[in-house]
Amino acid sequence: MTDHQIAELLPFYANGTLDAAERTRVEAELASCTSCAAELRELQSLGAALQLRAGDAPPLGQHVIDDALARIAVPPVTTAATRLRTAWWGTPARYATAAALVVGVGAAAAAAYHAHEADVARTAQGVAVTNADRTTTIFRVTPGPNGAPVVASNHTPVGAADAPKQVAQQNATESAPTVAKQHRLAKKAQLELLVRDVEGSLKQAQSVVRAAGGDVVALADSSPRTDAATHEAKLDVEVPASALDATLDRLAAIGTVQNRAIDAEDIDATIVDEEARLRNLRREEADLRKLMDKGGKVDEILTVQQNLSEVRGQIEQLQAQHAHDVHRVATSTISVALTEDRPNAVPAKPGPTARIDGAWHGGLNALADTVVTLLTTIVWCVAYAPFPLALGGLAYLATRLLNKRTASA
Amino acid sequence: MIDADDRRLLERIARRDRVAFETFFRAHGGAVQRFVRDLVRDDGLAEELTSDVMVEVWRSAGKFGGRSRVRTWVFGIAHHKAIDALRKRRATLVPLDELLGAASDAETPESAALRADDRRRLDDALASLSADHRAVLELTFVEGFSQKEIAEIVACPVATVKTRAFYAKQRLRDALATAEQRP
């Protein structure tokens, strides 16, 4: 190996990245070549100097991270309006809207009636979809009529959940001409599960959350003191917002879903406002620094220094708030409640007071039922009275006609 | 941060995980900023480029082939962006006299490790090198990359990296010697 070849390898020998074979060759040369050893010492000094110099380089500013975070905050396809515009049934729905407009007053009236019905259904199911600025978008799901949980997740077109979609479709169509708005949603979800083994399910839930890149932030496990008490546990977790739906689905699979809800708050305006205020404060800080650099009388410098310190304080406070809000968008929280499902548990025998109370309420309920049944019967009779009366009248007339004919004969 | 951690973060970034992105940024942003700053010799531009590099990581995380270390891939993006910015500015070689002011401004009282004069001479000597030579010195001695990794980052053959490292060191020594002789 020539001196030049060795010299070319020395920088990488100095930084410890040569492979074993090359390292052995270089070390063999170094043992016999004094100029090579001198060259290595120079390179090592140079490396140390460059590293010291690198240590003095300005640190990464929070504003650089904030800038990139703002740039990657492209609205994810999570808002109800966007989903509705892009959903497979969106096109037929738009045609249906156009057709309704063409048909005229009658069809419009029918559409209004259906909208009203959808509104009623939405209220009845506890589902609220609102998409105005700074308002809350809520999807709530309750157990269906057959006892099975109705999962009104954003992609599941089931039963009553279609009604609010139609309403939201209408809202989306109405707001279509406006400029597309960026939504930054801070989402919270609740999940109530009935499980056989709370402890095992708790571990399962924790591993699901960890697999999704999330963390457990609170855990309350109340183990039962007696056999009669039910084992319950509560778990608050944070997961990346993008993994919320998938994590909820995986958590739901652990037990029988009693309740599943997602609340989302649009905090885009708050974040934009914070960013604008931060920019202004930083500009102000830069101006104050320039003033400081210019120098002047001691009292003037002290005043500028005081202002600078106040502005820095405000910047740091706002940065913390901004980071918190960005974090709220980036991560979603899920509150999971696990309750032990004990179908074979023997119900505790009620005490005498409870039995008397039960009898009293049972009697009152029976009386109320009787009164309601009676009143219902009367209302039915009144409602159907015209029919028997009309029939009776006809029978009377027919009888009289028959009698008259018999008499004349 | 070990490469396995970087890969996990990159997978999460590909799934649009902003928390992972921020973690990744905090882990590598400082080194990227330092590297591009040495190439473009402009603090403001270096910050912009760092942001550009990380946004590119966000966009292309799903395309990372996994053939190299994640860090090598990121420095490859950084090098490409910095060279591109230099081309646009037509400032691959900044005259030494213009840099004397900038180098003095960059002095901080904390740099006790290097004496002010030595530090200034080193800054000036580095400034007189081409961006290619500065890049190879920075990647070798500050970031600790191997010849193959540097070849991947700066997109040239390994032999060229070795030659550049050799000549970069020679020119730096010459520049330092010249500065020493100057009154």
Image (spheres, grey):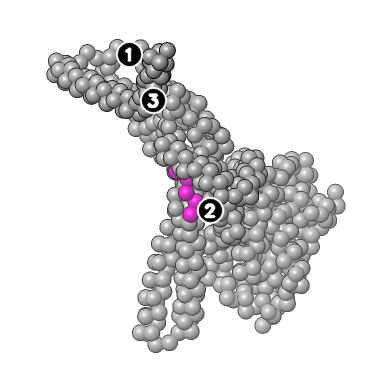
Q: Is residue A312 left or right of residue A360?
A: right
Q: Is residue A306 visible?
A: yes
The residue indicated by pointer 2 is A183
Q: Indicate which label's residue lies in the foreground, 2 or 3.
A: 3
The residue indicated by pointer 1 is A345
Q: Chain of mark 3?
A: A
Kindly state the secondary structure of the residue where label 2 is placed: loop
Question: Which amino acid does the dot numbered 2 rest on?
Answer: His
Furthest-right residue in this view: A2
Q: Is residue A131 magenta?
A: yes
Q: Quadrant of residue A363?
A: top left
Q: Is residue B29 left or right of residue A202?
A: right
Question: Which of the two labelled residues, at mark 2 and mark 1, occupies the earlier sequence position?
Answer: 2
Q: Is residue A223 left or right of residue B93?
A: left
- Cα–Cα span, label 2 and label 3: 65 Å
Q: Chain of mark 1?
A: A
Q: Which residues are magenta?
A: A127-132
The residue indicated by pointer 3 is A390
